[in-house]
Amino acid sequence: MHVNIVRWLLRRIITDMRISFLGAAKEVTGSCFLIEVPAGRFLVDCGMFQGGTGAYRKNLGALSAPFAAKALDFVLLTHAHLDHCGLLPRLTAFGFRGPIFATAATCDLVEVLLMDSAHIQEKEAEWENRHHHERHARRGWERAPLYTVNQARECLRQLIRCDYERSIEPIAGVRLVLRDAGHILGSAIAEVWVDAAATTRKLVFSGDLGQPARPVLRDPTPIAEADILVVESTYGNRLHKRLAETEDEIVSALDDTLRRKGGNVIMPAFAVGRTQEVIYVLADLVRKGRLQPMTIYVDSPMAMAATELTLRHQQLLDDETRDLIEWQRHHPERLRVRFVETVDESMALNEVRAGAVIVAASGMCEAGRVKYHLLHNISRHECSVVITGFQAAGTLGRRLVDGARRVRIFGEELPVRADIHTIGGLSAHADRAALLAWLEGFRRPPAHCFVVHGEAQTAIDFAAAVRQLGWPRVDVPEYGQQVGIGAAP
Ligand SMILES: [Zn+2]
């Protein structure tokens, strides 16, 4: 009897551990998980909801209801993409004063991305209020930025730089280690050990996982054990093309444009991650002699900052990439990478009629300098647009991929005469096979696995595949759902 009461009490204490899914539940943005354990409470990621008309309202409501920001002990950040860190300044504005743990490279990238994001928030609010002034005045409403540049700067002071592979103890009873996730520079898988009564539970958060055997970054670190696993599923229903096939496509598109047709190549690319990957792939193809020597113009201030950070954190790159950087240093004449800093320099590129490879943001052709380059090149037969990233529905990039014959850029209706090449094989995310291979690295199935960060059907399909591995309990959580993660039933 006495023993039973003790056991009951222990289980009460242990099951007093909870995880709440505050984002990335049946969708790919807004990553945010609240963990409540006997020792305290913390967030893993604090991401922004992106895409779609409802994103702003969702972001407004995101951190207000479920918990008090002031009562959080710390935040653990897996990587610098905005859908993982984009609401941190709001958390600070709501009164969170604790530390935000992330790798050093993530801290550097977060600074670049959050300052830019805050700037965009301010501009969007200003634009909205100016253009819909009368409607807002009738309703007595004004759009406020999600956060200001000052608020973003404030929250950056809470970042604590951590090394990979080193154990830290943010609060008594919670220990964590970050492992390389191979997704973007500084990205991490988080292993978290939580003491509860007489036992320790181990939680693992995959963050976003990279595709193994791809350029620039190392492969995702295998993890051997977890009691609770939260795993992403962005491409849980898809297989990527092989890298060799992707390289062949790039060679044929660039050769055809630069040598046969004698035009320019425009490559829209995300500033962080994709731009550096594109530079690597092109450099490697020039080194192998598969492409002629060339000049790449990188026209995006943020891409320049991200590329500088990548070089500053060279120890995080894979061996092949470090070799390639060394090669390029000794052969600057074979591959010139020119960072276009000023708007004047960017405009000067409009006069270049042939032989230029221009890599510019934004990745989906919706904003930024790439629109100017498209304006000047899209109606010329001898030019090409080489698309290397995901293009969301409704974007200019998507219309080009879908074969639009005419597009509107800055109010000007233009015929599409340039060739549009869609290169599918570059992705920062592990595909279905790579995700499953990573899961098979666990020595024993986790007691409870949660599939997150995937569109609803993708996450559901991927969860079914994980159950096929013989894992006992695999769930796809709902937005806002709270689940006990104490002792196994
Ligand atoms: Zn990511």
Image (spheres, grey):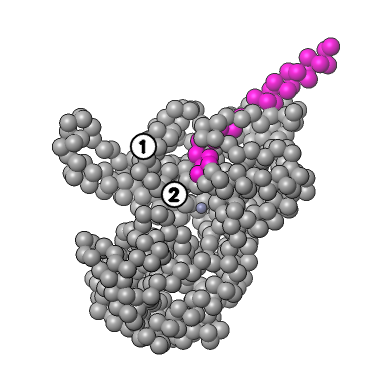
Write down the region rendered in magenta: 1-27
Please indicate whether residue 371 sits to the left or right of residue 284 in the image.
Answer: left
For image coordinates 78% across by 14% down, the residue present is 5
For image coordinates 19% across by 41% down, the residue present is 132
The mark closer to the camera, 1 or 2, is 1
Where's residue 50, x and y in %? 41, 46
Q: Residue 36 falls in which quadrant of the image?
A: top right
Query: Does residue 17 show up magenta in the picture?
Result: yes
Badge 2 marks a residue whose secondary structure is helix
Q: Which mark is residue 28?
A: none
Disc 1: which residue: 57
Residue closer to the observer: 10 or 387? 387
The image shows residue 375, relative to residue 206, as above or below, that is below
For image coordinates 45% across by 78% down, the residue present is 253
Q: Is residue 351 visible?
A: yes
- Quarter of the picture containing the C terminus is top right
Q: Which mark is residue 82?
A: 2
Where's residue 98, x and y in %? 49, 36
